[in-house]
Image (spheres, helix red, strand yellow):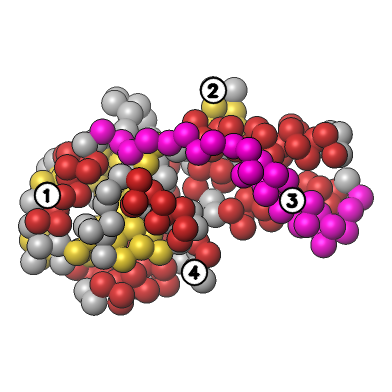
Amino acid sequence: MSTIYCRDKKFLDIQAIIFDKDGTLEDSSIFLNELANKVAHWLDYKIPGLKEPILRSLGMEENGLNPAGLMAVGSRLENEIAIAAHVMEMGNSWLESKLLVQEAFKAVDHVLERRTAIFPGCYEVIVTLHQSGLKLAILSSATREGIENFLEKYQLKEFIEVYQGSDQGYFKPDPACFHLVCEKLQVACEKTIMIGDSQMDIQMAKRANSAGAIGISWRESVPTPNLNGADVQIEHLNEIKC
């Protein structure tokens, strides 16, 4: 077990750390912006009038993607359902709406390059935490395949023992997500910390009776109300010491 230090907070007897992926370890903001806009444009071409309501529901604002919005924190399925509701309002059946939205995402996935990057210093922090004896996992709203691609791209697979995506049965903030990962790691929830960039991560950890929830913004001196409730808020992963 390890003691984790983070700013003025100390977490005792920690066995494991669970990370969110998008917005926590991987900067996917450019990709998600492009994905939201291209899906909205594709559907607007099919059914004029859909673009603006879709973009609003996905959390697209004048200055870009809302970090607390649906596209930023939701699963692919949750995004599809939200968009399909708008398509249905245009006179389509629910089945027709869902199929059309799925077609839109498939079409955009086929042509859109996934432009992402690991946040600076993440690799080094993960290696250090692993070497200290902590068990590490990723719990993400991305798919399991998406997590695997991230781990392989940045050579992190040997350090992450468990990874779980939104296509494996549960959605944040359901504490069952957290419980399942801890079970796979063979650690107690009360000895496990969650690190994430959204209220979904924080609420899930709290409801799962975790050892703590650390919110990360990657933005200096910028208020982050979506991290309210975290035990401590940080701006860089290297603020976590063991």
Badge 2 element: loop
> Upstream in the sequence, badge 3 or badge 1?
3
Residue 181 falls in image quadrant: bottom left
Q: Which residue is mark 2?
A: 63
Q: CA separation, marks 1 and 2? A: 36 Å
Taking 186 as reference, is 205 left or right? right
Residue 131 location in percent, x, y?
A: 9, 56
Of the two numbered discs 1 and 2 on the same chain, state the one appearing first in sequence: 2
> Element under label 4?
helix
Residue corresponding to mark 4: 168
User: Residue 68 location in percent, x, y?
Assistant: 49, 41
Q: Which residues are magenta?
A: 91-120
Which residue appears at 62% of the width and 44% of the height?
A: 109
On the image, numbered disc 1 is attached to which residue?
128
Determine crowd level at label 1: few under 14, some 14-19, many 20+ residues with C-alpha closer than 10 A: some
Q: CA distance from mark 2 to mark 3?
A: 28 Å
Dot 3: element: helix
Instruction: Report if residue 85 is visible in the image.
Output: no
Amino acid type shown at disc 2: Asn
Q: How many angstroms separate mark 3 from mark 1 (CA)?
A: 43 Å
Ranked by sequence position, the earlier of labels 1 and 4 is 1
- Kind of element beneath mark 1: helix
| Magenta highlight on residue 100 | yes
Up the image or down, 208 lies above or below 78; here it is below
Residue in the foreground of this view, choosing between 81 and 167: 167
Question: Looking at the image, is mark 4 or mark 2 earlier in the sequence?
Answer: 2
Marking on residue 103: 3
Camera sees residue 224: yes
